[in-house]
Structures are given as C-alpha cells and as structure tokens.
Image (cartoon, rainbow, N blue to C red):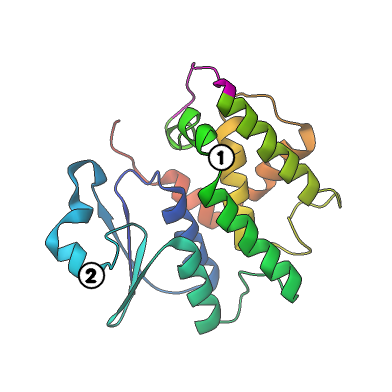
Amino acid sequence: MRLYVDSQFASPYAMSAYVALRTKGLTFEMITLDLASNQNTAPTFAETSLTSRVPTLVAGDFALSESSAIAEYLEELHPTPKLYPDSVQARARARQVQAWLRSDLLALRQDRTTEVVFYGPTDAPLTTAGNIAAQKLLRVATSLLAHGGMNLFDEWCIADVDMALMLNRLILNGDAVPAQIADYARHQWEPPAIQEWMQFPRPPL
C-alpha cells in the first residue's frame, strides 16, 4: 500500500489516515507531494487519485482519497484493531463528529491553521467569527466528554484524533480552553503514531 500525503505533514486529514494505518499495524509506503507547487494536480497523480487530493491511499489497483473514507475502508478490510466504536449509535456519532469537523468551523480553521499545530503559534487574535466557531467547538467537545473520560466514547476511536487536532489549534496557540478539554487533547496526543507524525521533518514555511 502507498499513502500520499503533503510534504509539509500539515494536513490534518493526512495525519488521520496515517494514524489509521499505523493503528491497524499495516505496512505501507508514504509518498509526499508538494501542494504549494501543485504536484497533486500533475497528470500522473490525477490518474491515480480520482479527486487529486491528499491523503490518497493506493492498495493494489484501488485508490481512495478522503481520510474518513480511508478509515472506514481499512475498518472493513481489517476489523481489528478497531478504529470505530462497537455500537451502531456510537459508530454513527463518531462518523458525525468526523464529518462535522471537516465541514464546519471554517472561521476557526482560517484563524488557527494547522501551521499553529505543526510549526508554531500565531500572534493574531481570533476574529469574531473565529471566536464563535471556537466556542461552538468547545461546547460540542464538552458535551461529548460529559462522561468524564479521556475518549469521546468508551474506547479510543479515530474520531478522537480529529477532535484532538481541532482542539489543538486553540490549545497549542495558547488560546483559553477549559482544563478538562485541554487534558483530553493532551492525552489524545500521546499515542506513538501521532508522535511519529509530529516528528517528521518539515520544510520551512
């Protein structure tokens, strides 16, 4: 298998796919593409990836992009170790969280790009829209963690990776976050696969 990711290792979705593969214990080759120079739109990659996006996973003659689709594909192909909760409702909620984090909170993602997480904090304050989005994120995270545990559900799942990364846009920038939420994100940042991703050499911005 081959996993195509961005050469800056700053895509939250590439990281999620990487963690999914490492959690499954699968052997794969990682190939980086320089998105700034549009390597992902080159004809050779466009022939491989239907949407010319990273991450793209290639397994034999099958190629799949979109990190949540990759996670669900791997889960069906290799049921253990698990990426998603056991119960139907918890799995549905985990997928809801993943879809929501990818489609909402645009102002927060603009104010606190993943450069904050992978390169360093910014001095720019949150915009009004960014602050509204941040408060929405914290409200949802607080609700999901009302049980007092260190995972969104009974056990770790891939949605924890996505939630922790979104929260770390605030936490690693020094923005105010409730202690319980900060503890959760810190705990979720400890697994070896995430630490590996954090240590990959990154080119200067």
Label 1 residue SS: loop
Residue drawn at point x = 23 percent, y = 70 percent: 48
Name the residue carrying label 1. Answer: 105
Q: Tag 1: residue type?
A: Leu
Residue reaching furthest right? 147
Q: Quadrant of the N terminus?
A: bottom left
Q: Tag 2: residue type?
A: Thr
In-front residue for pair 152/204: 152
User: Quick check: is 124 in the magenta stretch?
Assistant: yes
From the viewer's perspective, is residue 146 above or below residue 174?
below
Residue 194: horizontal and vertical position, in percent?
Answer: 52, 52
Q: Quadrant of the C terminus?
A: top left
Please state if 44 lies on the left or on the right of 150 as rendered.
left
Label annotation for residue 188: none
Name the residue carrying label 2. Answer: 48
Tell me which segment is drawn in magenta. Answer: 120-128
Residue 179: horizontal and vertical position, in percent?
Answer: 77, 33
Residue drawn at point x = 69 percent, y = 62 percent: 156
